[in-house]
Amino acid sequence: MRFTPHTDADRKLMLERIGVKTIDELFAGIPAGIRLDRPLNLPEPLSEPEAVCVLNKLAAENTGANQLACFAGAGAYDHYIPAIVDTIVSRPEFYTAYTPYQAEVSQGTLQAIYEFQSLVCRLYGTDVANASMYDCATALAESAHMARDITRRNRVLVAASVNPTHVEVVRTYAHGLNIPIEFVPLAGNTIDLDALSRMCTADVAALIIQHPSFFGNTEPVRSASEIVHKAGALLVVSADPISLGALEPPGTYDADIAVGDGQPLGIPLSFGGPYLGLMSAKKKYIRNMPGRIIARTVDTEGKPGFVLALQTREQHIRRERATSNICTNQALCALAASVYMATMGRTGITEVANQSMAKAHYLAAGIAAVPGFSTETSAPFFKEFVVRTPVPAARVVEAGVKRGILAGVALDRFNPEWKDRLLVAVTEKRTKAEMDQYCEFLKQEFGS
């Protein structure tokens, strides 16, 4: 939409309609001491071609995944996006600024969301899915709220191997909801099951665990599930959807709530968003799920149709019965994920998962052979792993960019004690030549 500034005549007409003569008279109710009495600190106005030129120059200062061999992950991954995804989501009936959350949305939009929910359930092996959350972090935070309401218990345990940025969102939610959050320590890079057994007491609502973990390792989820359910609590699993092409889906090990970030499913990195939260659960918890759920039904003539079946916000039901006031579905991102999942199918996602895993293991072995570097791969890992570096990991990242390599994510940004640890991710897009180039770069720059 183009921005059309108001003319002096427009402003005069609007002031007359509301019964004042000047802008100062309009703002008379605002104390003079807090009014801005000078022009805004903005550059001179530009024509559209001039503005485009400036923005292009600013954009050129960024170096994105298209210019670098991307080995960074930590929750956002450089997977290949089939061309059909953009082709479908760019159709004008879908590509709209309107947020399609109202009950009167079109049948086409409702069906697209219904198909998204169905595909998420098939991927995670769960019974029901909602119409999407903002991202994985908000889905995880909502699951803590949901677990407390279901169990009528208050404490929530979080494995210390959950993505730290997601944990911060959970903490923020929990602070407002007065939910105590406690961390289950690790044994190596995976959850300490003995500690979990001791901590899982009768007042625990849920365990939140990430599988594969933030460090890329697979967690002992079956054992954790048994411990948690024996204590009467819920198991909440955060899982990379691509990993489910190679690993068991959460439903098979009795997860009560399964969440994830849909970004790997056909959504570009885009400097951090918008992304897509996946959330699914057992059927018996359907009325505790936040957001919206679309259902398939038939009309009075027996013709199939789609409806907004559940919407448990306080905007729509009594406040005391509302499960959450979250108001999203990320409809366009959900559509992109649906197109990706339908296009790739079960075998396609399995192929992506297997290629990512095989290449990650190839690179890990190559890095471990570089003098001065080692990998923390004592536990099985999927497509991500931790590298111990002989210099601060941030230096490795900085040097890599100059060689056309995004070497990973320096973990000291999350914990100062991890300054010599680098989190490296490998997707199916990375080639053998790029991985060999990565190892050669480490040898030349830092090998001792």
Image (cartoon, helix red, strand yellow):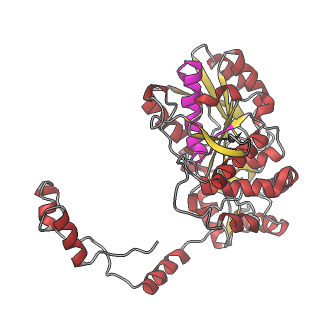
What is the span of residues highlighted in magenta in the rendered image? 129-158
Of residues 446 and 45, the one nearer the viewer is 45
Quadrant for the C terminus in the image: bottom right
Q: Position of residue 227 (x, y in %)?
A: 72, 20
Q: Residue at x 18, y 70 (%)?
A: 38
Residue 48 versus residue 232 in the image, above or below: below
390 left or right of 32 in image? right
389 inside magenta stretch: no
Q: Position of residue 81 (x, y in %)?
A: 74, 63
Q: Residue at x 57, y 57 (%)?
A: 274
Q: Position of residue 252 (x, y in %)?
A: 81, 31
The image quadrant that residue 315 belongs to is: top left
Figure label count: 0
Q: Position of residue 19 (x, y in %)?
A: 14, 62
| Residue 135 visible here | yes
Of residues 166 and 72, the one nearer the viewer is 166
312 left or right of 17 in image? right
147 inside magenta stretch: yes
Q: Which residue extends farthest top?
A: 202
Q: Residue at x 60, y 33 (%)?
A: 289
| Residue 363 visible here | no
148 left or right of 221 in image? left
Of residues 54 and 431, the one nearer the viewer is 54
Residue 207 versus residue 359 in the image, above or below: above
